[in-house]
């Protein structure tokens, strides 16, 4: 079946909603819950439902990441009639019978129930993740039932490409990969370039250690990414898209490939989409585990089948991108924001967040914190709210020492800045960056010099080797940091380290080298005493 | 003309190239498919790919060695992959690496001399809430320490995969 009009799409959505059984069990099959054997739990629950003859009144499905990974495995039971939703946490295979009985008797398993009135749930605002943990990522119908692809059909039947770009500009959406460049402007530049071939690329090469936002989006709601890319293609006049995903994310790769296949079957991808003369195809390309390929020019070189070396900019991708053609490159989360913006309007999106940073941001909250997991908050939420309300504070009564954001390109934020809002500029002002959304919490037991060395070591082994400052500088920085860790450093080492920081930052070719000193600079700034302790007595 | 490879597995690799029209930019996809089929990338495999895609061998070798994901040597009988992402690092992944390498005398990134165990590091597997995470023969386990990791390694080496 091919869908050609908005009416047909809405019809399918309605049909799908009516098909739903009264009760539904959703088992989180995100990476963390899978590691806790959630797949076996799901099978056990199905057979328990069968035993209790509940198959017709209660359906069961696997869903993507629910967010509260610390309480996995997570099972959600929803009642479509009463709109009641119960989340069960830390569910084991042995709890399956209990849950199936509670469904039969219409009761709640109090001992497993998760408190959904906790700030972890109430302080979040889900736009990007609104389907995560609710739909079956393998089912396009599930996505359509939640208004999926409506934005695309709306755009194709009623809007010009300029209107789409205008709407995105109005929304104030900025690149979620870390740079924060306004997405609307990027699209506009590419749309104005005259060329017979243009490309859309989605950067899913999430390489920051400690970050898994994009992975969760691709695994839990792959169609949202596709929809965003197709709309981008329409807006700038491109007909081919590539999603560049890490090969280390096999589940995300398979979800995306399945999603592309089922979208093609419904005519949402391919030739003459929605009965118009607009064509669009998407292909998945696997990365090879090189952090530098998250850099735009390196990523493009890699898609072309080469070693992932970055190149000098300009020329910018908008003129000279993939295969020398104008290219729009955005990150997974940026594309996932597109459909909701088109559906609800740019003004709606712009009403969320702060003056300079609009909308929401997904963070991966990890490290020494109670509620590890995936959270989406409005821009401008303070770090304090993030750590103490949503994150539930530091375990074992320990004190907070620092928050690391932005991965190897970011910095460590000391507790005195807990009240600054999370937005692009304010984080930059205190020497860190928003980055793609990794947020690692460290308590008093962490040594900041060692953390700095960890990141420099990371950049050292990920340096592509093309330019000298990065290739050689990171090696030297790591050597000096090791001296500090061993408490053998001298005054000269400290000066040298500071000098290296500025040389590597100023003279490296690409973002990897330019930002590699950030973890050292920020720890030097806020935790200098630890460096002093690392000097010879 | 060189002899045509007889190994049927080459067909799998060839299929990927065919799908992508034997274009030069099919190289990385082809390497992925070759590694999936053969387990690692041998010189002969790389030469085969170079010939088919009309690329110099140096280029194919260069790309294969650039990306961490590609292995040019066979894996050991069993693998232990330790996540070295930030969250795992903070929660003591380096201690686990140290303990396992000492106990089984195998360095990170290497295979033990008897070919039984490969010890690898991964750049964040994205299960940070389970940190520190180790993947034993494809099975992800979290909240580990040195001792419990050693026990798991012993378990997979014993061939008992149904703990």
Image (cartoon, coloured by chain):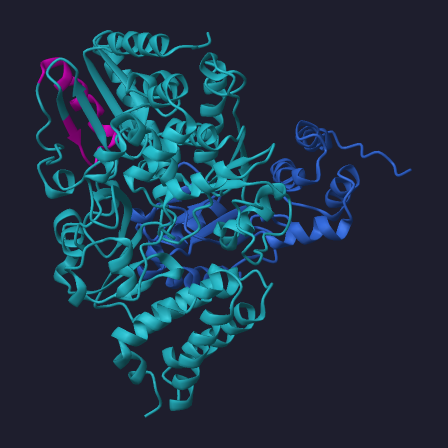
Query: In x, y percent, where is residue B158?
Result: 48, 45
Residue at 24% of width from left, 48% of height from top? A372
Q: Position of residue A145 (x, y in %)?
A: 29, 16
> Measuring 54% from the left and 55% from the top, which residue is drawn there?
A314
In this view, the residue in front, A498 or A280, is A280
Which residue lies at the image location 41% right of the left edge and 36% below the top edge? B162
Question: What residue occupies the far bottom of the structure in this picture?
Answer: A537
Q: What residue do we see at 74% from left, 29% from top?
A: B8
| Colour used to depict chain A in the structure image | cyan
Residue A441, relative to residue B135: is it above or below? Answer: below
Q: Is residue B154 magenta?
A: no
Position of residue B151 in the picture relative to residue B2 (left or right): left
Chain in blue colour: B
Taking the image as shown, residue A432 lies to the left or right of residue A454, namely left
Task: Answer yes or no: is residue B77 visible.
Answer: no
In the displayed orientation, state which residue is furthest to the right.
B1
Percent from the top left, x then y, of residue A31? 36, 38
The total number of labels drawn is 0
Quadrant housing residue A530:
bottom left
Estimate the x, y position of residue A347 in percent, counting from the top left: 23, 34
Main SS, magenta region, reads helix
Of A506 and A218, the residue lying toward us: A506
Residue A96 falls inside the magenta stretch: yes
Corner quadrant of residue A312:
bottom right
> Over which residues does the magenta segment extend?
A86-106
Q: Is residue A120 visible?
A: yes
The answer to which quarter of the image holds residue A30 is top left
Residue A297, relative to residue A215: is it above or below?
below
Quarter the C terminus of chain A occupies: bottom left
Q: Nearer the viewer, residue A489 or A278?
A: A278
């Amino acid at each position: 079946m091919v869908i050609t009009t908005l009416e047909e799409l809405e019809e399918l959505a309605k049909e799908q909603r009516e098909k739903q059984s009264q009760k539904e069990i959703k088992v989180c099959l995100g990476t963390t819950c899978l590691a806790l054997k959630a797949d076996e739990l799901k099978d056990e629950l199905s057979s328990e439902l069968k035993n209790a003859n509940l198959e017709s009144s209660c359906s069961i499905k696997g869903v993507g990441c629910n967010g509260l990974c610390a309480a996995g495995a997570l099972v959600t039971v929803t009642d479509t009639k009463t709109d009641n939703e119960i989340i069960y946490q830390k569910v084991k295979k042995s709890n399956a019978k209990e849950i199936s009985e509670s469904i039969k008797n219409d009761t709640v398993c109090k001992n497993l129930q998760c408190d959904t009135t906790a700030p972890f749930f109430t302080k979040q605002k889900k736009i990007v993740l609104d389907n995560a943990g609710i739909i079956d990522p393998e089912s396009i119908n599930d996505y359509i039932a939640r208004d999926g692809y409506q934005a695309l059909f709306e755009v194709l039947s009623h809007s010009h490409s300029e209107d789409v770009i205008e709407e995105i500009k109005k929304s104030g959406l900025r690149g979620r990969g870390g740079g924060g460049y306004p997405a609307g402007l990027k699209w506009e530049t590419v749309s104005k370039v005259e060329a017979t071939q243009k490309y859309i690329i989605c950067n899913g090469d999430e390489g920051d250690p400690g970050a898994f936002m994009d992975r969760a989006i691709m695994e839990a709601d792959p169609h949202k990414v596709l929809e965003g890319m197709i709309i981008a293609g329409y807006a700038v006049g491109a007909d081919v898209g590539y999603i560049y995903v890490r090969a280390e994310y096999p589940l995300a790769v398979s979800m995306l490939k399945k999603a592309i296949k089922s979208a093609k079957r419904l005519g949402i991808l391919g030739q003459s989409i929605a009965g118009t003369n607009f064509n669009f195809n998407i292909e998945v390309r696997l990365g090879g585990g090189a952090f530098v390929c998250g850099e735009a020019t390196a990523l493009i070189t890699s898609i072309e089948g080469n070693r992932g070396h970055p190149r000098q900019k300009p020329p910018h991708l908008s003129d000279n991108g993939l295969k020398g053609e104008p290219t729009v490159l955005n990150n997974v989360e940026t594309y996932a924001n597109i459909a909701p913006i088109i559906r609800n309007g740019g003004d709606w999106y712009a009403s969320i967040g702060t003056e300079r940073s609009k909308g929401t941001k997904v963070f991966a909250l990890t490290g020494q914190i109670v509620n590890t997991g995936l959270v989406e908050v409005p821009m401008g939420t303070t770090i304090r709210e993030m750590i103490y309300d949503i994150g539930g504070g530091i375990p074992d009564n320990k004190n907070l020492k620092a928050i690391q954001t932005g991965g190897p390109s970011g910095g460590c934020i000391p507790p005195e800045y807990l009240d600054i809002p999370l937005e692009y500029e304010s984080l930059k002002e205190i020497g860190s960056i928003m980055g793609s959304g990794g947020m690692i919490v460290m308590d008093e037991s962490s040594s900041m010099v060692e953390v700095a060395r960890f990141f420099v070591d990371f950049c050292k082994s990920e340096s592509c080797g093309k330019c000298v400052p990065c290739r050689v500088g990171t090696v030297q920085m790591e050597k000096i940091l090791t001296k500090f860790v061993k408490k053998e450093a001298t005054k000269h080492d400290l000066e040298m380290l500071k000098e290296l920081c500025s040389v590597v930052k100023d003279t490296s070719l690409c973002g990897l080298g330019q930002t590699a000193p950030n973890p050292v600079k920020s720890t030097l700034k806020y935790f200098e005493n630890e460096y002093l302790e690392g000097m010879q007595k | 003309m060189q002899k045509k490879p007889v190994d049927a597995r080459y067909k799998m690799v060839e299929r990927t190239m065919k799908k992508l029209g034997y274009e030069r930019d099919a190289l990385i996809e082809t390497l992925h498919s070759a590694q999936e089929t053969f387990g690692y990338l041998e010189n002969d495999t790389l030469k085969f790919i170079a010939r088919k895609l009309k690329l110099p061998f140096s280029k194919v070798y260069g790309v294969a060695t650039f990306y961490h994901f590609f292995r040019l040597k066979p894996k050991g009988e069993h693998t232990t992959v330790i996540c070295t992402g930030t969250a795992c690092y903070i929660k003591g992944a380096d201690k686990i690496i140290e303990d396992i390498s000492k106990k089984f005398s195998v360095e990170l990134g290497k295979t033990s001399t008897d070919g039984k165990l490969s010890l690898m590091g991964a750049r964040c597997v994205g299960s940070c809430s389970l940190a520190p995470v180790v993947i034993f023969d494809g099975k992800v386990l979290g909240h580990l320490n040195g001792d419990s990791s050693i026990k798991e390694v012993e378990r997979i080496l014993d061939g008992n995969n149904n703990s």
